[in-house]
Amino acid sequence: DGGITQSPKYLFRKEGQNVTLSCEQNLNHDAMYWYRQDPGQGLRLIYYSQIVNDFQKGDIAEGYSVSREKKESFPLTVTSAQKNPTAFYLCASRGDRGHEQYFGPGTRLTVT
Amino acid sequence: AQSVTQPDIHITVSEGASLELRCNYSYGATPYLFWYVQSPGQGLQLLLKYFSGDTLVQGIKGFEAEFKRSQSSFNLRKPSVHWSDAAEYFCAVGSMDSSYKLIFGSGTRLLVRP
C-alpha cells in the first residue's frame, strides 16, 4: 500500500526546544517537500529535496532544517529559532513524470 | 511572480445543488493547474490536474474543472453536491522554476446544507 506517512499526528513542545517531524514515503519518488499551513492560508514551502543528499530552501526556511540521507525519508527539524512554530506541517512527494504532488496526513505542532 | 487567488473564503450550498469554486492564477505561459481537497485535520487529496490539451478535465468524486486562458481561471465544478463534499478546497499552480513547488491559493471552505 503506497503512500506517505507522517508522525506523530500531534506534537506538543515548550518554547526553546527543537523538535523533529518525520516523513516517510514508499512511492519511490525522488522529490520531497515540506509545507507549512496556517489557519485561513494556503500552504507555504519550507524546504524541498529533488534527490538524496541534496535539499534547497523554500520560501520560509528560516528556523527550520532538513536532511535527506535516504530516498524514503525527509525529516524536518523545527528549531528554537523559528519565531512562530505552531502550525500544521505537511510533507509531500512528487514523481518523475508529472508535477502533481502527493501529501501525507500532516503533523500538528503546538509550541507553548 | 506566480500567484493563485481564490476569491471565496466560504461557500454554502444545499445538498443536491450544483457547485462552482473559483480560481484565478497569474502566469504568462500555460500553467500546470491543480485542485486539492482537505478534510479537517487531514492531508491534501488531489482531485484533478491540468497540464495541456482538452480544457475541461475530469477528476475524482464527480468533480470537473475548466481551464480558460482568456480569463486566467480554472474553476472547479460539480453538478450535484453530497454532504460528504464538505471540506476545504485548494487551487494550486505548479512553479516553472527548478523547484516544481506548488503555489497555493488560500482555500475555499465548502459547507453543505442538508
Image: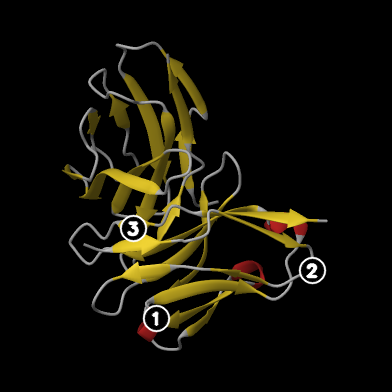
- Residue furthest to the bottom in view is B54
The local secondary structure at tag 3 comes to strand
User: Residue B1, position in %: x, y?
Assistant: 21, 62
Mark 3 highlights which residue?
B102
* Pointer 2 local density, CA inside 10 Å: few below 14, some 14–19, many at least 20: some
The local secondary structure at tag 2 comes to loop
The local secondary structure at tag 1 comes to helix
Quadrant of the rendered image containing residue B76: bottom right
Structural distance between the alpha carbons of marks 2 and 3: 32 Å
Q: Chain of mark 3?
A: B
Q: Is residue B65 above or below residue A107?
A: below
Which is in the foreground here, disc 2 or disc 1?
A: 1
User: Residue B35, position in %: x, y?
Assistant: 48, 64
Structural distance between the alpha carbons of marks 2 and 1: 28 Å
Q: Chain of mark 2?
A: B
Mark 1 highlights which residue?
B71
Residue type, mark 2 in image: Gly
Left or right? Give the position of A100 relative to B27. Answer: right
Count of residue discs = 3
Toward the viewer: A40 or A35?
A40
